[in-house]
Image: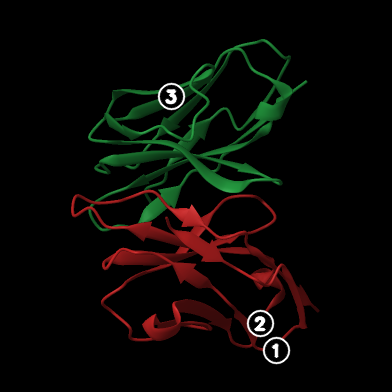
Chain colours: A red, B green
Amino acid sequence: AQKVTQAQTEISVVEKEDVTLDCVYETRDTTYYLFWYKQPPSGELVFLIRRNSFDEQNEISGRYSWNFQKSTSSFNFTITASQVVDSAVYFCALSGSSGFGNEKLTFGTGTRLTIIP
Amino acid sequence: DARVTQTPRHKVTEMGQEVTMRCQPILGHNTVFWYRQTMMQGLELLAYFRNRAPLDDSGMPKDRFSAEMPDATLATLKIQPSEPRDSAVYFCASGSSSYEQYFGPGTRLTVT
């Protein structure tokens, strides 16, 4: 069975501070995919990143960066110089790989991030 | 900018009534998912289809929920009869062989 743990329920930081959201996963699959989604107050789920299990390179996209460490089964997300618009609930998710395409996502419970102006 | 669309966005109904939610996946995506989000259970999979064939509906209460894909541009989720515990946000998502899943805006269902 697959499991995703986001131990941080809520985080508050002052604007311009850096913040890291933790994600730990469990799976028996050798090939799998990890995701981060953002859910702003409006409620939609916004895709941020997908990373496959064979690619452990860290990724940076603007103020966002992701640290994938297979050895610790973690896929952490860092926001640099946070802004009020970053306030949202962030979900980490995991899927297997059938070789045919998308598989169902197992989500963590989410981390509510509040950026204080 | 291709998006997943869902209708209705909001639905309030009385217990016992039938509810139908619709989803139009992104053109060319071959996999469609239905997820439900509640405060207690978080985000959970209800069912999903690949090339219109159902692959997994183990997350759905079989006696009252049904999911179908009449064609490649439409997926439906029906609840009959609805119950107050079905109140939730129902998300449709679509994906392709690239393993990325894109979500619709959701249908917020309230059953009184």
The disc at residue B76 is: 3
Q: Chain of mark 1?
A: A
Residue B50 percent coordinates (x, y):
26, 37
Q: In the rendered view, does A43 fall on the left or right side of B1?
A: right
Mark carried by residue A82: 2
Say which residue appears at 55% left-offset and 43% top-offset.
B105
In front here: A5 or B20?
A5
Provide the residue designation for mark 1. A17
Per the image, label 1 sits on a secondary structure element best described as loop
Chain hosting mark 3: B
Secondary structure beneath label 2: loop
Marks 2 and 1, Cα distance to the nearest angstrom?
A: 6 Å
Q: CA distance from mark 2 to mark 3?
A: 39 Å
Horizontally, is A93 left or right of A32 in the view? right
- The residue at 57%/13% (across/down) is B80
Check the image and name the residue furthest to the right. A117
> Is residue B107 shown left or right of residue B67?
right
Question: Quarter of the image holding residue B111?
Answer: top right
Kind of element beneath mark 3: strand
- The answer to whether one can see residue A114 in this image is no
